[in-house]
Image: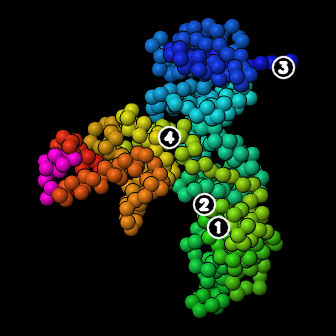
Amino acid sequence: MGHVPSILVVDDELSMREFLKILLEKEGYAAQTAANPAEALALVRQGAIDLVISDIKMPGGSGLGLLEELRAGGLSVPVILITAYASPEDAVRAMKGGAYDYITKPFNVPEIKEIIKNALASGGPIKESEEPEGASFQGIIGQSQEMRRIFDLIRRIAPTHANVLIQGESGTGKELVAQAIHELSKAAGHKFVPIVCNAIPESLFESEVFGHVKGAFTGALANKPGLFTEANHGSVFLDEVGELTPLIQTKLLRVLQEREFKPVGSSETIKADVRIISATNRDLEAEVVDKRFREDLFYRLAVVPIRVPPLRERKADVPLLVNHFLAKYSALFGKEITALSSYALEVLMDYDFPGNVRELENIIERGVALENSNLILPESLTLSAHRRRAVQSREGEMSGDDYFELGLDEAVASLEKTLIAQALERAGGSKMRAAELLKVSFRSLRYKTKKYGID
């Protein structure tokens, strides 16, 4: 019979210890529990523990302190930290200290099972040499399991010359992934040339990308090298590749097959010594099935496919990203905003981020610009106002499906905003009278009108 992994659960709450112990034993692990860090440290020193799952906030000490004592004592047992009070500082400290993962309560049971499985397979903490600064890889902020898998894939494929297709929603950071692949490749000393496929008209695409010779067409007053020539020995990044027209798809396929091209109006053949990294927010496999994208081109581009998950699927990265953007915009605006309030961070952790990392950055940038204290409060956060306006501007009354599309928090906010506006209209703009109509205090109404930007 093989070794049964032994997992130690450290939490001051008896109910949480019992819940995790039952969960772990159902999964076939041996489980032990400890009510405080001192008790846990003694058990680990006995040498029979394969993984530690510890709460961060405990009356008898902290999970971060336990982690630091384990590492100081040369004990490399993997540690998963859990908390109900996520903060950017704790997340960064945890990952720099060598924690395997940092997750927030209430956690998703299938997700924690997967994290436990991967932590046991890792045999130890993520080392600093493997994960620079504990939370960043080639400028990409992330320490979630999803992002670590991507970092590992980038390391493995970058040295090859294989074409890569990066798929993911808008705002997930696909270009950062492409740049990381280039920077870790043999082409790193040469140019990384981005081409936004839907920004170049079909009639100009060949000329812009492959170049042209003097006299090739009206207005071609001189020879012009194309972007592929500019990227010679380097990497071409085809952003929004799913937007290419059928004609351009055919021309690009020919270049990928032959590894050479001709500038417009030229008989000279130029070798295409470039690596192709593509990105799209479309489901290209579905586009192939629907005959909107060439199957042969898809397989040429997607030798190695990478899916960048949306931010809602990697919430463990939110505190780290918040910390990064706070530092960036505090410096830019000359402010000393050090953190979000615990409730403001909770609001963000509960939010789905339809605009992904780009939206989170905009939220923090606005928050820093609006906040006058050194702490960002919930009222300085602006969440998905564009989506609320879009749904509210539909003709007719909002249906149940509309509300479900928004989600509970946004649906409640949408209805609240509508009722406040109607009350103010009935009250002729008098907030005192509107508060009476709504049966709320004047102070509460004043707060909400400010929150929703209702004049």
What's the residue type where badge 2 is placed?
A: Asn
Asked if the magenta segment contains residue 434, the reply would be: yes
Callout 1–callout 2 Cβ contact below 8 Å: yes
Asked if the magenta segment contains residue 286, the reply would be: no
Residue at (73, 85) in percent of width and height: 266
> What secondary structure do most residues of the magenta stretch adopt?
helix
Numbered disc 2: secondary structure: loop
Residue 422 in the image: state x and y as whole percent: 24, 57
**What residue range appears in magenta?**
427-438
| Residue for badge 2 | 281
| Mark-to-mark CA distance, 1 and 3 | 49 Å
Numbered disc 1: secondary structure: helix
The numbered mark at residue 318 is 4
What's the residue type where badge 3 is placed?
A: Gly
| Mark-to-mark CA distance, 4 and 2 | 21 Å
The numbered mark at residue 2 is 3
Numbered disc 4: secondary structure: helix
Q: Earlier in the sequence, mark 4 or mark 1?
A: 1
| Residue for badge 1 | 242
Q: Earlier in the sequence, mark 2 or mark 3?
A: 3
What's the residue type where badge 1 is placed?
A: Gly
What's the residue type where badge 4 is placed?
A: Val
